[in-house]
Amino acid sequence: MEAHTADLPHREIYKLLTGCVVPRPIAWVSTLNTEGQPNLAPFSFFNAVCSNPPTLMFVCSVRGTDAGQKDTYNNVKATGEFVVNFVTESLAEQMNITATEFPADVNEFAAAGLTPAPSMLVKPPRVAESPIHFECQLNQIVTIGDEIGGGHIVIGTILHIHCDDSVYLSNNYIDIQAYQPVGRLAGGAYSRTRDVFNIRRPDSQLPESQKKGE
C-alpha cells in the first residue's frame, strides 16, 4: 500500500496511525474544572518529552461526535493543572469506563468506582488505585487543529512523582513485572509488557573532549 495523506480522509489516517504507532502508553489524566468538579479520562497520544525540566505531553483530540472540546482540555486550559495516573492490567476495565463521553457534570471517579486521593502540589486528585502519579503544571498548549481529527498538544511540567513501593526499585528504577502497565493498540486492542528483552546500547563514539556527561 502506498498513499499520500492528502488523498485520505482523516479517519482512514487515524486507523493507520493507531495501527502502526504501537504500543502507545496511556495518560490517565485527572483534572478539576473551575467549580471543583473532577474529571478523569485516558489519552494514548502521550509520551515523556525530557527530564530537565521534567516534561510530558498528551493530546486532547477534538471530539468526533460533536466537534467539541473535551472536558480535560477545558479544565487544563482554565486551571493550569493536571495529574497523569498510570494504567495497569488490573485497572484496564475502569480506565475503559472513564473513556466514555459523559456529560461534563459526571464524576468519572464515581462512575468507574475509583478512589480520588489528594495530590501533594496540585489541586486535581490522584487515582488512589494507580501505583504511579505525575502531578503536572501546564507549560503550554499547542493547537494543531480545531476540527474533527485535529487536537491540542498539552505540554506539562512534572512537579511531583509518586511511585508506590510495590513497583519501586532502588536507585529510581521501576519494577516492570510488578508494575504491569498496558499499552494502547488500535480499536479495542491493548498490549501487556510481560515479554521483556534487553539490548545493550552501543557506547558513544564522540571524542572525549565533546562529552559532558548525563
Image: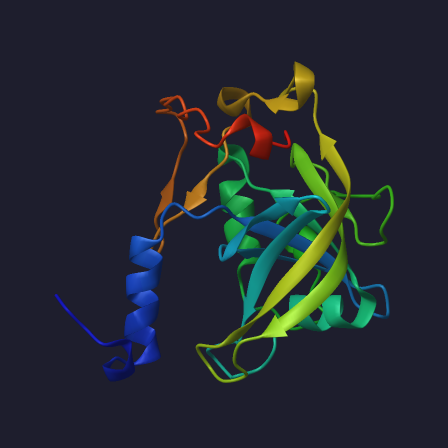
The answer to whether residue 122 is left or right of residue 92 is: right
- At 54% from the left edge and 21% from the top edge, which residue is drawn? 178
Q: Is residue 163 above or below residue 124?
A: above
Residue at the image point whose x is 66% and y is 60% from the top: 155
Q: In the figure, 67 relative to 140: above or below?
A: below
- In this rendering, the answer to whether 72 lies above or below 163 is below
> Along the line of sight, which residue is nearer the eye, 204 or 68?
204
Residue 210: quadrant of the picture? top right
Using the image as rendered, state which of residue 171 and residue 97 is in the foreground: 171
The picture places residue 27, in percent across and down from the top left corner, at 58, 50
Rendered-image quadrant of the C terminus:
top right
The residue positioned 46% from the left and 28% from the top of the image is 204
Q: Quadrant of the N terminus?
A: bottom left
Answer yes or no: is residue 70 visible: no
Residue found at the very far left of the displayed protein = 1
Name the residue located 49 percent from the left edge and 21 percent from the top edge.
177
Left or right, 98 with respect to 184, comes to right
